[in-house]
Image (cartoon, rainbow, N blue to C red):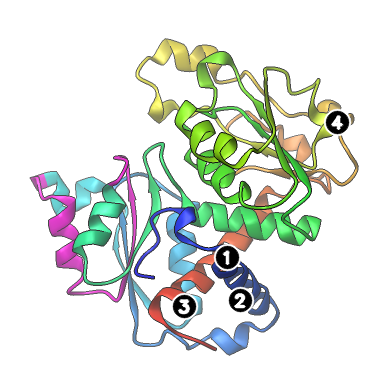
Amino acid sequence: MNGLNDIMDLSIGEIDELLNTADDIMVHPEKYASLCKGKKLATLFFEPSTRTRLSFEAAMYELGGNVLGFSEAQSSSASKGESVSDTAKTVSCYADIIAMRHPKEGAPKVADMRASVPVINAGDGGHNHPTQTLADLCTIRREKGRLNGLTIGLCGDLMFGRTVHSLIGAMSRYENISFVLISPDELRIPEYVKAAYLAKSGIPYTEVRSLEDNIQNLDILYMTRVQRERFFNEADYIRLKDTYILTPEKLSKAKSDLCVMHPLPRVNEISVSVDDDPRACYFKQVLNGKFMRMALIMKLLGVKA
């Protein structure tokens, strides 16, 4: 494979390979500490990020490599009008691999077509976020011991939530999966996502508005924030932003082994009083994301322990 634009670019076998590598990195970090010595990762972030950018950087440093790049479009030649294509071709002269986040859907794919080094999609608008999905899959497997036979609740902004779209695609390939899609009418899952993954694979799902009435049935609860940056209308954002807030009271109705996940950043949708609940797994997701990105960088660079 060249780069990674969409989680569906990976076969189930390749995902299993990455998960197994990540598991080994967690147990034997010393084996991996210098595998990418002399290699450079360029982080091209045209959109704000904390976890994803720093996770990629930490991943490369822990593999013994180096990092260069920028963290906002204003500090790049994009502010002068340079195209994504030209930026990718230019940065290919300096780096061995690129991680790109961009507000426009499809921009990392364009970059991958023009770059001479692998390009990893680190999030493109409301479209895809494949490395977050790898972190999610790692978390689910570590917490539940499996990636099949699960009822997954997705709650909040399902229209613009690129992490949700990628996770539905990935999980639609496993057996005995069902989804409970929890959102206000204005933020329901896009029809193209339902057609491409749920209908195509015959995955059972329900669309509901209430979290409280459905939480008791879930094995996984994936909370998302309502994303101000995706709204054209501030009034709509304000009206919808606090639709769902997970509290200890609501969690009291859930299974004792529920896995609560969130791609972060969190605003109000999970009360901080939930953080100490053993079912809260969202900070574990952050750490798992670093290990999965280490495994992915190694795979794309053809490096083995």
Q: Is residue 264 above or below residue 269?
A: below
Is 25 magenta? The answer is no
* Structural distance between the alpha carbons of marks 1 and 4: 30 Å
Q: Is residue 144 above or below residue 124?
A: below
Residue numbers of the magenta segment: 80-106
* Structural distance between the alpha carbons of marks 1 and 3: 13 Å
Q: Quadrant of residue 40?
A: bottom left
**Placement of the N terminus among the 4 image quadrants:** bottom left
At label 2, the amino acid type is Thr
Residue carrying label 1: 15
Badge 1 element? helix
Q: Are marks 2 and 3 in contact (CB under 8 Å)?
A: yes
Q: How packed is label 2: few (under 14 Cα within 10 Å), some, or many (20 or more)?
A: many
Q: Residue at x 81, y 20 (%)?
A: 213
Q: Nearer the viewer, mark 1 or mark 2?
A: 1
Q: Residue at x 46, y 49 (%)?
A: 129
Q: Nearer the viewer, mark 1 or mark 3?
A: 1
Is residue 233 in view? yes
* Structural distance between the alpha carbons of marks 2 and 3: 9 Å
Residue carrying label 3: 298
Badge 3 element? helix
- Residue 103 screen position, x and y as percent: 32, 40
Residue carrying label 2: 21
Residue carrying label 4: 216
Badge 2 element? helix
Give the mark nearest the N terminus, 1 or 3: 1
At label 1, the amino acid type is Ile
Q: Are marks 4 and 2 in contact (CB under 8 Å)?
A: no
Q: Nearer the viewer, mark 1 or mark 4?
A: 1
- Residue 174 screen position, x and y as percent: 67, 53
Which residue is more in the foreground, 84 or 240? 84
Q: Which mark is residue 71?
A: none
